[in-house]
Image (cartoon, rainbow, N blue to C red):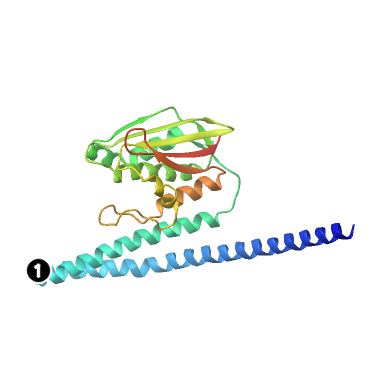
Amino acid sequence: MRARDELELRVRERTAELSRANRELARSNADLEEFAYSASHDLQEPIRNIALSAQLLRRSHGPALDPEATGLLETVIGSARNMELLLRDLLEYARLASETDEGPALADAEAELDTVLQSLEASLLGLGAEVTRDPLPRVRLPAARLRQVLQNLIGNALKYRVEWPPRIHIGARPEGDGWRFEVRDNGIGIDPRHQEYIFGLFKRLHGRDAYPGSGVGLPICKRIVEQAGGRIWVEPAPERGSCFFFTLPGE
């Protein structure tokens, strides 16, 4: 009995240690999220001022500047815009963590996809993109969040295209008590070695010169889907390109 009592005591002590460690980790994560939110919010105005000042300088003194000075101004403006985009996406990522859970809303995926395609209409027409779709369900997720996920995944399909016109398919099928969505493209594809890496914050496989962006879009998708109780992953498309899958609870 004594050995059993000692074992139970060690188990209780270990459980208490794990509980304390989890609380400390939660506090650390909360502090980090608060810092990211505050820093990204407070830095937006100075970055905008840098971009605006450089633009005004170019407008007022552009004809008098030599090519080297003009190039430097363009670099400042471009870098400020990239930083502003990064801060905006980081702010959104941090905001997701601080949202209070008031219960999942119900989103009509058909209607949200229509809204996303309408917002991307100019890009779709300009690239001659072909978009096909299956009937889509209603899911347990705020409509704005589902729209973010679809916008990011379809936007990436347009961005990481190859020479021929982009072909994108959006579908869904029942899986368990919910739905498994698919966004399939014929783009450049993703090396299987990097299929987890790309969902990390600021993880990029290509330079901004080749493909612009902040590197926060897929982490935002991952956070939205996981907060709803689903998961998101990517696989190679059957011929060429990528298939992004994500699951969400059903109606």
Residue 47 point in image, percent of width and height: 33, 67
Residue at 28% over, 64% down: 79
The number of numbered discs placed on residues in the rendered structure image is 1
Residue 77 point in image, percent of width and height: 25, 65
Q: Which is more toward the observer, 110 or 32?
A: 32
Residue at 43% over, 59% down: 90
Q: Which is more toward the observer, 142 or 167?
A: 167
Q: Which is more toward the observer, 60 or 194?
A: 194
Residue 121 point in image, percent of width and height: 29, 39
Q: Is residue 248 left or right of residue 17?
A: left
Residue at 15% over, 71% down: 69
**94, above or below 171, in the image:** below
What amino acid does circle 1 point to? Pro
Q: Is residue 251 visible?
A: no
Name of the residue lying farthest toward the front: 3
Q: Is residue 51 visible?
A: yes
Residue 124 point in image, percent of width and height: 28, 38
**Quadrant of the image occupied by residue 76:** bottom left
Q: Dot 1, crowdedness within 10 Å: few (<14), some or many (≥20)?
A: few
**10, above or below 112, in the image:** below
| Residue pointed to by mark 1 | 63
